[in-house]
Amino acid sequence: MEHAFSLAGASLVALGSGALWWPEHRLLCVSDLHLGKSVRLAKLGGSALPPYDSRETLSRLSDDIDRTGAAMVICLGDSFDDLESAAGLPDPELRRISRLQAGRRWIWIEGNHDPGPVSLGGMHLGELTVGPLTFRHIADPAASAEVSGHFHPKVHLRMRGHSLSRPAFLLDDRRLVLPAYGSFTGGLRSTDRSLTELMRPGALALLTGPTVLAVPMPR
């Protein structure tokens, strides 16, 4: 359910859930939770999604925190579908977040969907550097030793006559792009130009799921 690798000398683990685990710092990182997405879409009269997306996302996050014993959690931007969604989360979800934050350092990184502070616990930062790695929402093409999200990368493969489509981490020698952690968030194919231009030749895709599958990034 996990795949160990290194980036800029940091020993990291990609979890099958789509979370990143850094054992040295007891740091768990997730990106693009998009909490409140179903509620926002319902208000806009768009496609109806099951109203349990936030509950399901927080449940999986709770499982990852319990499993790893994380002392620090970084939410790498677009944690909420918009700032109104952050303010309008139901009380059970707000209480769940408070319980998850208790006793650990919690960092909200700003995203394009949630560009300002929210009235929840934890720190609110534009980006954060821990050891050799910088955590930000949107990749900086000129950067190195970078962990980012935003693109919701997804990989489509044909294996033994069957199609396989999963959210995926994208990894090269300079950066890691995390998959979207939130339920019902959709994804961008790794073959999209924005990703093929961002990731260097030789990049890997780490497909999430019950078994983390490492393959050359489809271009």
Image (spheres, rainbow, N blue to C red):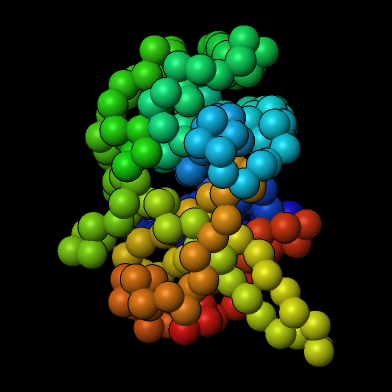
x, y percent for residue 129: 28, 39
Q: Please report the residue visible at 37 percent of the width from the left and 19 percent of the height from the top.
A: 118
Q: How many marks?
A: 0
Q: Is residue 145 above or below residue 123?
A: below
**Residue 176 appears in which quarter of the rendering?**
bottom left
Q: Residue furthest front?
A: 45
Q: Nearer the viewer, residue 184 or 218?
A: 184
Examine the rendered structure and indicate whether residue 144 appears above or below residue 49. Answer: below
Q: Position of residue 93 (x, y in %)?
A: 63, 18
Is 189 drawn above or below residue 25 in the view shown?
Answer: below
**Residue at coordinates 36% horizontally, 77% vertically from top-left?**
193
Picture coordinates of residue 204 (x, y %)? 50, 74
Q: Position of residue 190 (x, y in %)?
A: 49, 73
Residue at image position (59%, 34%) is: 42
Q: Is any atom of residue 40 visible in this view?
A: yes
Closer to the camera in the image, 150 or 28:
150
The part of the image, by quadrant, that contains residue 39 is top right
Q: Residue at coordinates 62% horizontally, 46% vertically from top-left?
A: 47
Would residue 69 be found to the left or right of residue 135 on screen? Answer: right
Image-quadrant location for residue 199: bottom left
Where, quadrant-wise, is the N terminus in this rendering? Answer: bottom right
Near-viewer residue (34 or 65): 34
Q: Is residue 19 visible?
A: no
